Amino acid sequence: MKITTKNGSDLRPISGDYSTTTLIELTPESKMGRIPSNVVFLIDASSSMGGDKWSTVKTAVSEILGSLQDDDRVGVVLFDSSSKEIFPLASLAENRSAMQDMIKNLAAPSGVTNLEAGLKTAYGAFDKRADKDKLKRVNHVILLTDGFPTDDQGYRVEQTQKYEDIVRRHEHITLTGVGIGSADDYDSNFISKVSDIGRGSYYHANDLNKFKEGLQAEIAKLQSSVVGNLALKFSDLNSRIMRIAKIAPEITIYDIPGNSKGFELPTGSMTKDMTAFIVQTNSQGAGAAGAEIPLFSLTAVYDGKSTETVTVNIKATDREADLGQVDPDVFKAIQVLQVHLNGEQIQASLEAGDKAKATKIIENTTKIASNLGQANVTRALTRLATDISKGKSVADDLATIKDESKKTRLLIK
C-alpha cells in the first residue's frame, strides 16, 4: 500500500501557535484482491416496523443474501422488547437457502425498541467466533431501525451514552446505521452519530426505495473491500492533534485520543478506492526562519502488514507573503469536510431558534457544495431553505444532508 502526505502549506510563522492541515492518501496496490466479510444484520422488529416496512426489509435482506459471496458469513439478530439471534454468524456457502427461508418466514413485528439488548447480541455474535475467523475480513454490523431507542415501557430513551459506549468498545467491528422512514419518527442525530463511532456509513431512507438502494450500496462497498482493519499509527508527536477525519470515500470523524507521544487509531475497513484522511494539528514556532519542525510520524497498519513510516514536517518562515499559499488538494478536502460539519451547525442554529444564522450558513454551504459538484447536497440545502421559509418540518432535509454529505468517493481523487 502506498502512503502519501501533503500539507495545506509547508510554511508557518517563526513563533506562536499555528494550525496545519495535512492530507493523507492511502492507495491500495492493484494486486490486493477482495476480502470476505462477516456481516450481522441487526434488525428492529418492534411494532412500528409492521406493514410495508417489514415486507420490504424481508425482501431486501433476502436479496442481499443472494448477492453476497459463498465465502462471506452472515448472522441475523432481531430486537424488540428483547433481542434474539435467529441465525448465528455462518458461511453462506452452506446456509444461504436456510437463511433466506428463515427471513421469509419471520413473524410480524411486536414490542418496543430495546436497542441495548440488540447491540449486545449483535456484537456477541462476533465474540462467539475464534480470532482467526475474524482476521483478514471485514467485520461489520448493519443496523436497520425506524424508531427511537426505548425503555421496557416503550418510553424514548433520551440519554444515548450507553449505546454509544457499546459501539465504542468494539472498535474493530464497524457499524452502519440505516434510518427507515421519516426523520421525525427516528433519531437521525443518534443513528448518524453511532454510525460515526462505529466507523461506518449512515443512510437516511425516508422511502422504501431509498432503503433498498442504501442496502445495495452498503453491500457493494463490502464486496469491494481489500482491507478488513485499517489503523493509523501516530508516533513522535511534536504537535497537538485537533481533528482526524476520513474524507474519502466517505466522511468519518474520529474521537481524538489523549495527547500522548503516540497512539494507534482504528479507522475501519478499506475498499479498492483510495482512502484519504485529513489531520489538523497545532504547533509551536521554532524561533528561526528555515527551521524544520516535525509535526508527527505516521504508519498505516492493515491486516498484519504496515506501510513505510512517513514524517510530516513544516518549515518556519519570517516572510508573511509565504503564508498565503494553500495546496489546492488540501483546500478541496477541507471544503468537503466543512460541508458535512456545516450541516450540524445549521441544525444547532435551528434548535436554538436562530433562523437568520441558519439561513446564512445554508447560503454559504450551498455555494461550497455547488462548486464541489455535490448535486444531492445542493438540492437538499435548497429544499431545506424553502421548508424553513414555509415553516415546514425540516427533519428529513437535515437527515438527507447528513447522509449525502458523507458520500465523497467521487470528490477526492
Image (cartoon, grey):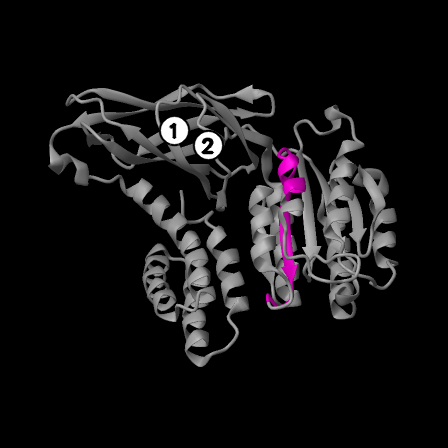
Report helix, strand or loop for mark 1.
Answer: strand
- Which residue range is magenta in the image? 165-183
Q: What number of labels is visible?
A: 2
The answer to whether the residues at label 2 and label 1 have Cβ atoms under 8 Å apart is yes
Badge 2 density bin: few <14, some 14–19, many ≥20, Cα 10 Å = some
* Pointer 1 residue: 4
Q: Position of residue 215 (x, y in %)?
A: 65, 54
Report helix, strand or loop for mark 2.
Answer: strand
Numbered mark located on residue 27 in the image: 2
Based on the displayed image, in which of its 4 quarters is residue 2 positioned? top left
Would residue 22 appear left or right of 155 to someone viewing this image?
left
Based on the displayed image, in which of its 4 quarters is residue 208 positioned? bottom right
User: Observer-nearest residue: 241 or 61?
Assistant: 241
Numbered mark located on residue 282 in the image: none
Q: Which residue lies furthest to the bottom in this view?
A: 390
Instruction: Assess whether residue 174 is covered by the magenta stretch.
Output: yes
Q: Which of marks 2 and 1 is nearer the N terminus?
A: 1
31 vs 211: above or below:
above
